[in-house]
Amino acid sequence: QAEAWLARLTPAQKVGQLMMVGFGGLEVDEKIEALVKGYQVGGVCLFKRNIDSSAQVARLNDQLRAYFEGGVPPFIAVDQEGGNVVRVSDAVVVLPGNMALGATRDAALAYEASKAQALDLKRLGFSMNLAPVLDVNSNPANPVIGIRSVSDRASLVALLGAALVKGQQDANLATIAKHFPGHGNVDADSHRALPRLDDDEAQLLAHLEPFRASMDAGLDGVMTAHLAVPKVALDGTPATLSAAILTGLLRRRLGFDGLVLTDELEMQAIAERYGVGRAAVLAVNAGADMVLVPWRAEKKAEVHQAL
């Protein structure tokens, strides 16, 4: 079926499939239609700015799907981790966050919690969740992971992380685990600067235990991390743009054949150094399947043109 679709798509439509976009507002309008239907994007990601209530977002998701009737259905994604990253809070299961689940040491509970949350998201029309976080929070000075992580122990993150993945996927919600190859052992926030991870390959592989466990459980996809790993990607290229990380480590060394989605290319760690359009090209050439461009309209146009 995928091959049949590809045969019918023009190059411009194939480029659209490489893009996951966002937009402002609670309702669709002509500008949003021109964005998602005009580019025939592969995915749409909704944030808190798009969600007022469960009933409202269910209608919004229905309207978005209607734009693609007869075409390639898009991923309709949300960033619903639980804890301090919650986009939908009205009339749905809301999880307490990964560290709270980690404190239970109970993989069966993590599975049921994840599945319950996923079933509610499916009912609202979402087809993908950009969660769970599989980072090992091994650096106490980390400004962006913290309680979003299950634990500072890789083995516990692996145990509960795989259960979170399986619960969500058993509810037929596509799952994108993050942030590969691990954002837990840095002391900078890639929204504002490029973090540096000084692990060598052996140390990095130890922190990748949660991703390996989830891949063994059939993980659908991963989201890349905007961080430099100079002892693995020797030129210091951020993981999102590095063939050494995405193709060499993720695809070949770990044998992952699922979806690779970048984190937001408009984050300063990437945008200030490379520009969003150039970064999109570098990411796809490095091994990414989709690029996430959720904010400014002109950046979406820049990415589409560059690709």
Image (tube, helix red, strand yellow):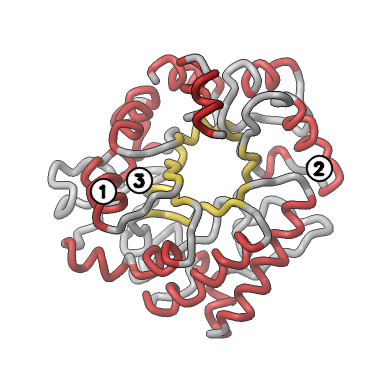
Q: How crowded is mark 2: few (under 14 residues within 10 Å), some or many (20 or more)?
A: some
Pinpoint residue 182: horizontal percent, then vertical percent.
35, 59
Residue topped by disc 2: 58
Residue topped by disc 1: 245
Image quarter of the N terminus: top right
Q: Which residue is drawn at 50% across and 25% down?
A: 6
Rendered view: 186 above or below 65: below
Q: Residue at x 35, y 32 (%)?
A: 284
Residue topped by disc 3: 226
Q: Is mark 2 on a helix, strand or loop?
A: helix
Q: Residues within 10 Å of mark 1 (few under 14, many from 20)?
A: many
Q: What element carries label 1?
A: helix
Q: What residue type is labelled 2?
A: Ala
Pinpoint residue 51: horizontal percent, then vertical percent.
75, 43
- The quadrant holding residue 90 is bottom right
Is 203 positioned to the left or the right of 57 in the image?
left
Q: What residue type is labelled 1?
A: Ile
Image quarter of the C terminus: top left
Q: Which amino acid does label 3 sit on?
A: His
Gap in Å between the C-alphas at discs 1 and 2?
A: 37 Å
Pinpoint residue 3: horizontal percent, then vertical percent.
50, 30
Is 8 positioned to the left or the right of 196 in the image?
right
Q: Which mark lies nearer to you, 3 or 1?
A: 1
Rendered view: 188 above or below 48: below
Q: Which of the marked residues, 1 or 2, is nearer the chain's N terminus?
A: 2
Q: Which mark lies nearer to you, 3 or 2?
A: 2
Pinpoint residue 115: horizontal percent, then vertical percent.
67, 66
